[in-house]
Amino acid sequence: MRLRITFSKIGAAKYSGHLDLHRTWERTLRRAGVALAYSQGFNPQPRIQLAAALPLGITSEGEIMDIWIEGEADLVAMRRELDRAVPPGIELTSLQPADAHLAALQTQVRAAEYTAAVESDVTGEELDSRIATLLAAESLPRVRRGKAYDLRPLVESLARESSDGLAHTLRMRLTAREAATGRPEEVLAALGLGDSVAQIHRIRLLFADAFSPASHL
């Protein structure tokens, strides 16, 4: 049986990497008494799929994970045990059945939406101008880990959502496909805000099915 878990990653948990998060969930599921199904082969592993890696230091309210369990389960009771077992910084949002015939979770993600709260000496009007320039650009050459790439096609939307003096909140939707993932900190750098204090939060992941939120699949 395939199940889909939606959860938040907040507080100190934002400093846990992708592999650490995977191990944390494996331990949590065991503590909750979930009968995980295992892969076949020489070195069987519990069947757990996280939708998309979350960069260190970023919080989220829309993380998605699929797990496979042996047989059927009382999801109300499972949810209760998971709520007790999750460590600080992880909050369960939903637990529901998922279509067993869907493709691997990682291959279904198409985009991610973020907010970024930024403190800088840039005014709202100047920030709007920088955003317009970025969106009008044909390309935005960047370098990540020594490799050149174009950031512009990875930015699907970008806007200033609100301002309070020199504190601004930006909202962006970035491509999140395999080998084509936009990173919010790179967008801030392209806006000239790379040295600003910023709190980045992933709101949700969007899947291939008519860009529906993953939790609605």
Image (spheres, rainbow, N blue to C red):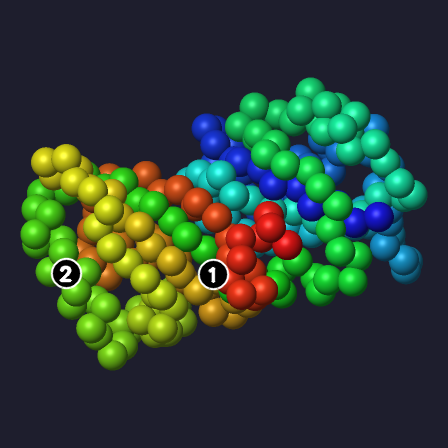
Q: Say which residue appears at 31% left-offset and 50% top-offset.
A: 171
Residue, disc 1: 111
The numbered mark at residue 150 is none
Q: Earlier in the sequence, mark 1 or mark 2?
A: 1
Q: Quadrant of residue 30?
A: top right
Pick the residue in front: 94 or 44: 94
- SS category of the residue bearing label 2: helix
Mark 2 surroundings within 10 Å by alpha-carbon count, few (fewer than 14), some (14 through 19), many (20 or more): some
At label 1, the amino acid type is Ala
Question: How far is the residue under mark 1 from the one under mark 2?
Answer: 23 Å
* Percent coordinates x, y for residue 213 in the rendering: 53, 53
Q: Quadrant of residue 134?
A: bottom left
Nearest-to-viewer mark from 1 and 2? 1
Number of numbered discs present? 2
* Percent coordinates x, y for residue 124 in the rendering: 11, 47
* Percent coordinates x, y for residue 76 in the rendering: 76, 28
* Percent coordinates x, y for residue 170 in the rendering: 26, 48
The numbered mark at residue 130 is 2
- SS category of the residue bearing label 1: strand
